[in-house]
Image (spheres, rainbow, N blue to C red):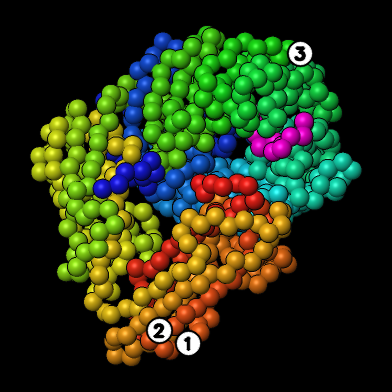
Amino acid sequence: MRRRRAPWAVVAVSSAWALIGGTALAAPWPMFHRDAAHSGVSAETFVSTTNAAQLGVAWEANTGAAVQSSPVVAYVASLGRSLVFVGNQGGKLSAYDAATGVRQWVFSAGAAFQSTAAVVGNVVYVGSSDHLLYALNAATGKKICAFQAPGVISASPVVVNPDGTGKVAYFGDNGLTGADDGGHEWAVNAVDANGAANCSAKWSYNAFGDPPGSQTLVGSWSPPAFARDVNGRPLLVFGSSSPEGAVYALDARTGVRAWRFPTRVEFDSDVGAGPAISGPGVNGFADGVVYVAGKDRVMYALNLRTGAELWEFDTAADQPAVIDPTRSSAALVGRTLVFGTGAGIYALDAVTGAKLWHSGTVEVVSSPAVVGPAGGRIVVAGQRDGTIVALDLATGSQLWAYATGANIYASPAVSNGRIYMTAATGFLYAFAVGGAGGGVPDTSISQPTQDQTLANTGSVALSGSASDDKGVAKVLLAVRDRNTNRWWSPATGSWGTTFSQFDAVLGSPGSAATSWGSTFPVPAAGGLYEVQAEAVDGDGQHDPIVALVDLGVESLTHPPTTTIDSPLNDELIYYPVSGQSFTITVQGTATDTAGTKPGVAAVWIVIKNLEHGEYFCGAAGCGTSGESSSWQPTYKKLPVPLDSPGATFTTWSFSFTTYDHPHNYRITAWAVDRDGYQDLVNPSIRICVRDVGVDICY
């Protein structure tokens, strides 16, 4: 039995609290950091410094894959209730009932969702690593239209009507591979009744640098903010990526640069945080203020109209030992500015830049949310150690904490009397005052064991145990066919593309400790499978660290066998010339001696860059039309030339070109025999490409 900090859940609902909200009257949180100016402040007052310690789990849902994006909440009039929208690294965007956690719909993209959605006018706008900005029906998840960008979209869109002629979705792309290889800031016509085609380009900007256009490798993954300056000019404000690291303001109508502010250039000089904007006249600043932090660990206050610096606060000078960068967007309430850093959360005076307080030592990428009544507001954020914390806005003292068990990149959303949050475990949480707390359940799988190969009897028997201090209410199982990436659903009696869970049979329902069991079917061809088990206690809390085993089932169809002989698993391979791509050759064998027609017909290979989630697609230019890259964000399998096609034994080799900087790669190969059967227990290796002198594969 293997456990890892990345489960991929149908919802369990706690009855320990009264339902609040889920109606049109609840304050929405429809986009990153709540609104177009990225204020990060909720109008709701259900939680305060006096009751924050009573926060607990109202419900939680397993989305099916790791999550790095943030949840958003919007009321959907046609459904008569609010939904929570969140995308995951498995390329699934799901909508959940905000009151109960029941999944409403799932949309599948070609690659991971790292962009946080924006919901405007019953339309969900969200970018994906497959280079597409999608516009989806908020009630059904059906695609309305999509815009093809040339690069990975990690930035979270902001959607506004800048000039009264129709809604526009603004976002950045960060290049073909997501590395330092160029990018754009985009204005795309949103779904609207005007004459512009939905999801068509309005303008784009890539004249990064000073002079304009001198920084050709720059893009943006900063969530852009929108505001109007003192003269009524609509501005789009965002940060640029390395190797530049600057703050830009463009005229939102035309894309013409209004101003540029350079941050300090360091090794990794992104401005990845989203700006928080204070409008003209607020806090005595006639022109308004842009608050934004760079990876240089400095929080800047800039004149909204001109981009001139008003003040700066250097967190590195305040904590010299801290080296982690600042990637958090600030929340602004009154004259208090709150943001995460490489070590904890800071509150500054928004007028002077003076430090009010500092809390914590763990890196906080999460952009804090502020909620509560005046005089009793709290700050909520996630830490990289997996802990969600609530602090007193006035003092920074910790009032509440909840451990998710895994890294947190996401930022909270506040609506419907709840705080919604995601973690890298893949869970979406809804917290409410009076929700469940205390110990979480624990789950184990005893049969099959990790990496066990079973005889094919047509089904696999599963068994294990679960425990909890308040009693085990259920154990949720999920089974994935690793060859097809499909999930078993007993309800439909079929394998589907959507993450699916089902109940195990408990030996002692409701007891503090119980056994559990279930089965799932396997075809004659056998294959590789992944089994997940997740206990739920009587309060609706899930085991945050899902139990997991991988297993194989023998084939009854005499399939071929495949080997990868070179490179070796976890082999370190060094750049001949640092900073220059080079070719790696993969070599192996394929064998097939049984069946009606013995012999190897084909070998297929998949090569994936693990950091970028990109797949090698062959000759230069295969990734995107007009580009020279050999990598694309969507899955790609390629045929391998055989030295002896049709023979019962053959050697094979395949060459691919690396990126020009260090990465890890996953290589998977499988043979297909002349009877049409494929090797379902196919070999897979990881290799680490490094600069000379870096002697670690991680």
Instruction: Tell me if residue 372 comes above or below residue 159 in the rendering.
Output: above
- The quadrant holding residue 48 is top left
Instruction: Tell me if residue 564 comes above or below residue 111 in the rendering.
Output: below
Instruction: Evaluate whether residue 37 shows in this view.
Output: no
Place of residue 462 in the rendered image (x, y in percent of width and height, measured from the top left)? 19, 54
Does 271 appear in magenta? yes
Per the image, the residue denoted by label 3 is 284
Per the image, the residue denoted by label 2 is 649
Q: Residue at x 33, y 39 (%)?
A: 545
Q: Which mark is residue 227?
A: none
Is the residue under label 2 in contact with that under label 1 (CB below 8 Å)? Answer: yes
Q: Nearer the viewer, residue 679 or 21?
A: 679
Place of residue 678 in the rendered image (x, y in percent of width and height, measured from the top left)? 37, 76
Instruction: Tell me if residue 519 comes above or below residue 600 in the rendering.
Output: above
The Cα–Cα distance between marks 1 and 3, rounded to whole angstroms, is: 79 Å
Q: Nearer the viewer, residue 247 or 565?
A: 565
Instruction: Tell me if residue 433 comes above or below residue 177 in the rendering.
Output: above
Q: How many marks?
A: 3
Q: Nearer the viewer, residue 164 or 661?
A: 661
Q: Residue at x 55, y 10 (%)?
A: 394
Magenta segment: 264-276
**SS of the residue at dot 2?**
strand
**SS of the residue at dot 1?**
loop
Is the residue under label 3 in contact with that under label 1 (CB below 8 Å)? Answer: no
Place of residue 114 in the rendered image (x, y in percent of width and height, measured from the top left)? 55, 46
3 or 2: tag closer to the N-terminus = 3
Place of residue 32 in the rendered image (x, y in percent of width and height, measured from the top left)? 58, 36
Per the image, the residue denoted by label 1 is 644
1 or 3: tag closer to the N-terminus = 3
- The quadrant holding residue 656 is bottom right
